[in-house]
Amino acid sequence: MSASMSPRHHVVIIGSGFGGLFAAKRLKRADVDVTVISRTTHHLFQPLLYQVATGILSEGEVAPATREILRRRKDIRVILGEVTDIDLATHIVTSVAGEGTTTTHYDSLIVAAGATTSYFGHDEFEGHATGLKSIDDALELRGRILSAFEFAELTEDEHERDEWLTFAVVGAGATGVEMAGQISELARRTLVKDYRRIDTRQTRIVLIDALDDVLGTFGTKLSAGAAKQLQMLGIEVWLNERVVGVDDRGLTVEDQSGKRTRVPTRTIVWAAGVQASGLARTLAAQSGAELDRSGRVKVRPDVTLPGHPEVFVIGDMMTLNDLPGVAQVAIQQGKYAADEIRRRLDRKPDLPPFKYFDKGSMATISRFRAVASIGPLRFGGFAAWVLWLVVHIMYLVGFKNRVTTVFHWAVSFLGRGRAQRATTQHHLLGPHAGQGLQVPDAPTASKTSH
């Protein structure tokens, strides 16, 4: 199937994340037609995925429907599809949804397909260590985390119980720290009175990173403070430890001396790295552009593909001047690309090279504890946590989402509850749920309950 062609300049945007969404919004009232092609039906507010995974927020609060967000924009068409090919010579984008294939012609193209979890060449880890890049990941993690406590309650075997009550988080960046902190809150506050045979306060949480600091981009002082606060929460912080093996019963790490240590666990969260969408390789192969170690395309200073000024590559898919892989980069580049397209149509001079304005970085450690880095300012504690709340509320899309999010934060942070502890049989028991099959590695339980 071919997407309808318009006599007006046609801008195709691949991806409905921060970069793609802000580019589409910026083209309002421009003399263009816009087509947004996305593999999902929603816009994902990725910084709050860890709260979906730990039961604070629902998926709908961090992932509003793209069509709902753009419903008033009659100049925008939204197409569901996984982009499988981009032909730079013919200006054709090919996408697939279900059994249907769609081809879409573009005059200008904005590629904002984002990134996926990187296992650093060990793709075999993926089946046992879940990343946190999508709603599917978050729901799977929620099921794994909640089921770990359920199975710990069932088993009679002490070693097996310890495995279920041990959680390993790989990667001590913002996502890893936030996940470790919330698992600790879940175990030590929310679930304390819910079980009869286990003490959830005895849960073991191990945060592992191959580098020598926690939240390294926040500076030495905040990094040390964050590590101390994590330890106060009962979290073991293992630094300079590289993961060399992962299976369904745990992981193995290796320190700088070559010594290996085994961590028996049934739940592993992988927050250690990212790699660009495979579309980056497609673009590089046709344009001769270079790729970095993470598979990102090296773009020109105006974020266009070398030799193809009509193609903009933004966000986590591109590399330029060592820009960080954060939402603000994608947002600012999306706006920049849209403005450049408008100027070309108006026959105005090109914009100066893209320049990123760093608005700072923030990460939560637990309730009432966060760190913030804004320009020359570095601070932590309650003030940073309040600032984190305000900023994230501002960037949530939709009034309804803001209201419900604040309510669920109040339930979780001021009280002990988690509004979203429901999980499906599939996520709770694994892919064999509902098929009459035994769950792999299910715990050994007594035949009678006590």
Image (tube, rainbow, N blue to C red):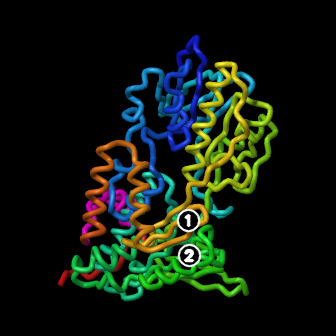
Q: Are marks 1 and 2 in contact (CB under 8 Å)?
A: yes
Of 331 and 243, nearer the camera is 331
Residue in view at x 27 percent, y 63 percent: 410
Mark 1 packing: few (<14 Cα in 10 Å), some, or many (20+)? many
Q: Is residue 418 magenta?
A: yes
Q: Give the image location of residue 65, x and y in percent.
A: 38, 39
Magenta span: chief secondary structure: loop
Magenta-highlighted residues: 416-440
Mark 2 element type: helix
Give the labeled residue for mark 1: 373
Residue 429 sits in quarter: bottom left
| Quadrant in which residue 101 is drawn | top right
Quarter holding residue 74:
top left
**Which residue type does callout 2 highlight?**
Leu
The residue lying at 52 percent from left, 38 percent from top is 22
Whichever of labels 1 and 2 marks the residue nearer the N terminus, that label is 2
Q: Local crowd at mark 2 within 10 Å, few (<14), some, or many (≥20)?
A: many
Residue 222's disc number: 2
Dividing the image into 4 quarters, which one contains the C terminus? bottom left
Decide which of 140, 219 is in the foreground and name it: 219
- x 49%, y 65%: residue: 363
Residue 209: x percent and y percent? Answer: 60, 75
Regarding residue 354, the answer to whether it shows in the image is yes
Left or right: 406 as drawn, with respect to 33:
left
Check residue 111 in the rendering and tell me which mark sits there, or answer none: none
Residue type highlighted by circle 1: Ser
Q: Position of residue 248 (x, y in %)?
A: 50, 71
197 up-or-down from 415: above or below: below
Q: Residue at x 65, y 33 (%)?
A: 85
Q: Residue furthest top?
A: 7
Asked whether residue 128 is in view, the answer is no
